[in-house]
Amino acid sequence: MSRYKLKDNCSPFDMVDGPAAGEKFVHGKIYDHVPEIYANRFDVLPEEPAQTTKNQNSEKRKVKDDDLKESLFTVHPSRTKKKEE
C-alpha cells in the first residue's frame, strides 16, 4: 500500500466534496489515501521493508567468553614456525 505526504510547495487544503469530504490535508502528516484529483500535490513515499518477527541477532553465532579469549590469544601457525637458516 502506498503512503503519501503533501509536497512542501503545495498549500494545505480541506476537502469539501466527494468521499474525502471534511478531511484536512496538511504538511508533516502521512496519508494512506489521497483524492485522485489532487494526487499531483503529494509525494509518494517509498514502501518500508516488512518487519520481521524473528530476532535478527538470533541467527548470528553467539560467542562464548572462552571462545573469545581463545581467539584473542591464539597465535597463527605461520607465526610459530622458526625460520630455517
Image (spheres, rainbow, N blue to C red):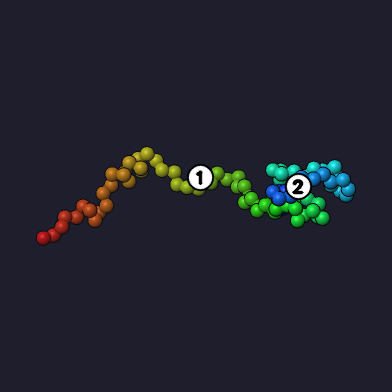
52 left or right, relative to 74? right
Q: Which mark is residue 19?
A: none
Q: Which residue is mark 2?
A: 11
40 left or right, relative to 85? right
Horizontal and vertical percent position of residue 27: 71, 44
Camera-nearest label, 2 or 1: 2
Q: Residue at x 50, y 48 (%)?
A: 59
Q: CA distance from mark 2 to mark 1?
A: 45 Å
| Disc on the earlier residue, 2 or 1 | 2
Q: Quadrant of residue 63?
A: top left
17 left or right, relative to 63? right
For the residue pair 60 and 23, the one nearer the viewer reads as 23
Q: Quadrant of the C terminus?
A: bottom left
Q: Residue at x 87, y 45 (%)?
A: 16
Q: Which mark is residue 57?
A: 1
User: Tag 1's secondary structure?
Assistant: helix
The residue positioned farthest toward the top in the image shown: 65
Q: Residue at x 85, y 42 (%)?
A: 22
The residue positioned farthest toward the bottom in the image shown: 85
Horizontal and vertical percent position of residue 30: 71, 45
* Residue 43 in view: yes
Amino acid type for the residue under numbered disc 2? Ser
* Residue 4 in view: no
Amino acid type for the residue under numbered disc 1? Asn
